[in-house]
Amino acid sequence: MIEEKIFVLVDLDTQGFCIKCSAEEFEELAARDGVKQAPHFAKKQWIFVDNLEVFGNAELKKLVERSRELVLSKLPKKRKRSIMDNGMI
């Protein structure tokens, strides 16, 4: 979580998870096997991934980092600055 904003949701039972992606990535990622539009989040470019094995480690890390960046970018400048000043980025 970043300032009470979620950037990853994980289902511990299935190892499925939701992440935010850019509008440009959304359709491409949602069309892949094991990935679909996240229920209740799809309008805001969130995808649901069936399990951790859908992506390789490097791609998964990149997607989670991108999700975090997208959520962080929506915060007010003052809150972003506070996070950066506290070394939370």
Image (cartoon, grey):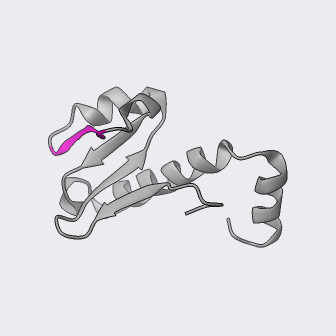
The residue lying toward the viewer, choosing from 54 and 13, is: 13
Number of numbered markers:
0
Tell me where residue 36 appears, x and y as whole percent. 23, 38
Residue at 19% x, 60% y is 53
Instruction: Check the picture and name the quadrant holding the C terminus.
Output: bottom right
Residue at 16% x, 45% y is 34
> Image height check: is 77 above or below 11?
above
Tell me where residue 27 appears, x and y as whole percent. 33, 27
Q: In this rendering, would 9 be left or right of 7?
A: left
Is residue 12 found inside the magenta-colored segment of the image?
no
Instruction: Check the picture and name the quadrant holding the N terminus.
Output: bottom right
Quarter-wise, where is residue 59 in the image?
A: bottom left
> Image height check: is 1 above or below 41?
below
> Image height check: is 52 above or below 86?
above
Tell me where residue 49 appears, x and y as whole percent. 25, 50
Q: In this rendering, would 63 be left or right of 57?
A: right
> Image height check: is 39 above or below 7?
above
The residue lying toward the viewer, choosing from 40 and 60, is: 40
Is residue 36 found inside the magenta-colored segment of the image?
yes
Tell me where residue 18 appears, x and y as whole percent. 34, 51
Q: Which residues are magenta?
A: 34-39
Q: In this rendering, would 72 be left or right of 12?
A: right
Q: In this rendering, would 17 be left or right of 43?
A: left
Residue at 49% x, 54% y is 7
Quarter-wise, where is residue 12 in the image?
A: bottom left
Residue at 36% x, 33% y is 42
